[in-house]
Amino acid sequence: MIEAAYTLAKELQEFLSLSGVSAWLCSAWKGEESRAQVNDSDLILSIGGDGTILRAAQAIVPGQTPITGINLGKLGFMTELSADEAQDKLPALLAGEGWVDERAILETELSPTDQEYEPPRIFYALNDVVVARGAIPRIVHVEASIDGEPLTTYKADGVIVATATGSTGYSLAAGGPILHPQAKEFLLLPIIPHLSSAYTLVLPSTAVVKLRISTVHQATVSIDGHINLPLSSGAIVTVKHSSNTTRFLRIHPETSFYSSLEQRLKGKQ
């Protein structure tokens, strides 16, 4: 897959160069290297699947450079072009014929309360924030509050806070609903709850969710599936709607989400 992505990237770089457009190549897995170049770019072409887009989005935020995803993966909910149509559609995008699909993202503050000398850390998620058990298969207790008011203590494998974009990912597998990708609302739901609340909450964009972890064993927090950090008992994860967004530059009709939903859920292209 990596070799195929690199081959296509080189072909598109040559194509763009012949069109008078300057282009650079970088692996989405090299976050610092790509982050250093995105601010001077007008468009990011993400070649791969949705995971590649999630990494590209991390490199861009809090910037506003749009992304056009070229799909080499299976589902490709966030991608826009197939590998076969990339060269045919790129001239139209470069000519300004596309439209901007703006997606809400989450801002996450991690406060390790058992280490008060360590300042809170801020992360951004286009898909989801997952607080869950670590390697040892034991449930964790997660005290959840919304806007400062106690909600419940989840006793579960973990808790997911998902954006509308992330509602078709891990959240869906855990039994959550599908939101329209441009919705501002976000989701709060447990993962395999044990004798505790099992329902999903759809929260307004103004909500602030605070999750306090209580566990004998180490837990983890995962941001978009690829920033994974250990959590000790007492750590607090605060999640809210970010003032930043992720922007996608698209060329296909805006109504195509519903017409392709069932097809994409079945993993067909």
Image (cartoon, rainbow, N blue to C red):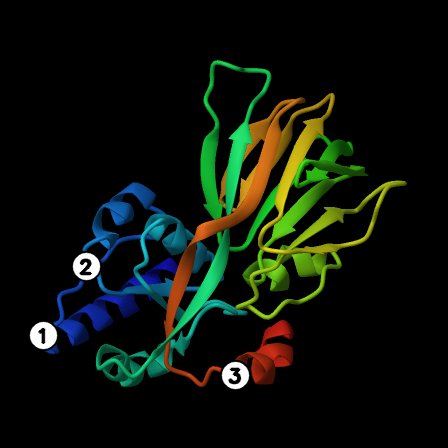
Q: Secondary structure at mark 1?
A: loop
Q: Is residue 122 left or right of residue 263?
A: left
Query: Which residue corresponds to the image point at 23% horizontal and 52% vertical from the top-left?
Result: 39
Quarter of the rendering containing residue 177: bottom right
Q: Amino acid at mark 3?
A: Ser
Query: Which residue corresponds to the image point at 27% horizontal and 49% vertical from the top-left?
Result: 34
Q: Which mark is residue 24?
A: 2
Q: CA distance from mark 3 to mark 1?
A: 31 Å
x, y percentage for residue 45?
A: 31, 66
237 w.r.t. 71: above or below: above
Q: Which residue is mark 1?
A: 20
Q: CA distance from mark 1 to mark 2?
A: 13 Å
x, y percentage for residue 181?
A: 55, 68
Q: CA distance from mark 2 to mark 3?
A: 30 Å
Q: Amino acid at mark 1?
A: Gly
x, y percentage for residue 262?
A: 65, 79
Depth check, mark 3 against mark 1: the one in front is 3
Q: Disc 2 or 3, which lies upstream in sequence?
A: 2
Q: Is residue 114 visible?
A: yes
Q: Disc 3 or 1, which lies upstream in sequence?
A: 1
Q: Is residue 240 left or right of residue 52?
A: right
Please state, as top left, top right, bottom left or bottom right, where the N terminus lies in the image. Answer: bottom left
Q: Which residue is mark 3?
A: 256
Quarter of the rendering containing residue 145: top right
x, y percentage for residue 55?
A: 41, 52
Q: Secondary structure at mark 2?
A: loop
Q: Amino acid at mark 2?
A: Trp
Q: Is residue 52 visible?
A: no
Q: Secondary structure at mark 3?
A: helix
Q: Is residue 231 left or right of residue 1?
A: right
